[in-house]
Image (cartoon, rainbow, N blue to C red):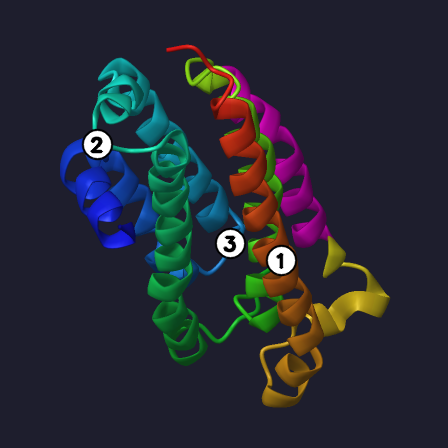
Amino acid sequence: MISNLLYKETRLAAHPNLIIFTLMGPLLLIPAYPYTMIFLFSLIGNFVNLMYTRETNDIYYSSLLPLKKSEVVLGKWLVLLVSQMLTILISIPFAFLRLQLVSQPNPVGIEANVAFYGFGLMIFACFNFIFLTSYFKTVYKVGTSFLKGLFPATFLAIIVECLVHFPGLTWLDSVTLKGQMQQLPILGIGILIYAVAMWATYKISVRRFSQVNL
């Protein structure tokens, strides 16, 4: 079922810009850049994708298929999940490549390290929970739902970029092996928050969409 839902979403419903915004990993090679923008670009890609869903009446079309309402939600939820995991996976090789090509530390904010990915998962979790649960109240107010999720996610990204400038938190900016081992708890917390938030996002979205009269 999951593979069929993903096939339908990627072949029929996904907007091409979703792919473009997922491929932002090379931005890690820019010497001075706020790297959390990679995660924010992913949010924009998913917003564009659901805008396309609305304009093509894909939710209505999906409801006409032999699918439960919970499976309609699952399809959109899976696209969000997969695109975000791909954003992270695609960026990782460029994080390693940055260590070889760029000798200067990032003056703007956090480096592309273990803590960076932990915080990135938290940014995703914050946005996903607000965005999807709001969207599935009506499945039409995409812009409003996006702004509700974008503001706290962007605020969190700004905090992450600023944290490494405080003297006591410079370890968050380390790219050494020892420093990144110290950052592992942040990655673990990020994974936990993301997993719990995605589970809650799906459950609440299903409950709200079940009350929508298409």
User: Is 62 positioned to the left or the right of 183 in the image?
Assistant: left
First in sequence: mark 2 vs mark 3: 2
Q: Is residue 209 above or below residue 108?
A: above
- Is residue 100 magenta-colored? no
What are the residue bounds of the magenta stretch?
Answer: 144-162
Distance, label 3 to label 1, CA atoms, is: 11 Å
Say whether marks 3 and 1 touch (CB < 8 Å).
Answer: no
First in sequence: mark 3 vs mark 1: 3
Residue 34: horizontal and vertical position, in percent?
Answer: 54, 50
Q: Which numbered circle lies on residue 13?
A: 2
Quarter of the image for the C terminus: give it. top left
Q: Is residue 119 above or below residue 188?
A: above
User: Is 55 positioned to the left or the right of 114 in the image?
Assistant: left
Main SS category, magenta section: helix
Q: How many marks?
A: 3
Residue 31: horizontal and vertical position, in percent?
Answer: 46, 61
Q: Bin the neighbour count of mark 3 within 10 Å (Cα to Cα): few under 14, some 14-19, many 20 and up.
A: many
Q: Is residue 9 above or below residue 135?
A: below
Label 3: state its secondary structure: loop
Residue closest to the eye, 102 or 134: 134
- Determine which residue is flagged by label 1: 119
Q: Bin the neighbour count of mark 1 within 10 Å (Cα to Cα): few under 14, some 14-19, many 20 and up.
A: many
- Determine which residue is flagged by label 3: 35
Label 2: state its secondary structure: helix
* Residue depicted at 36% across the width and 38% down the height: 71
First in sequence: mark 1 vs mark 2: 2
* Residue depicted at 79% across the width and 67% down the height: 169
Which quadrant of the view contains residue 129?
Answer: top right
* Residue depicted at 62% across the width and 80% down the height: 180
What's under tag 1, amino acid-wise? Phe
User: Is 132 positioned to the left or the right of 30 in the image?
Assistant: right
Distance, label 2 to label 3, CA atoms, is: 29 Å
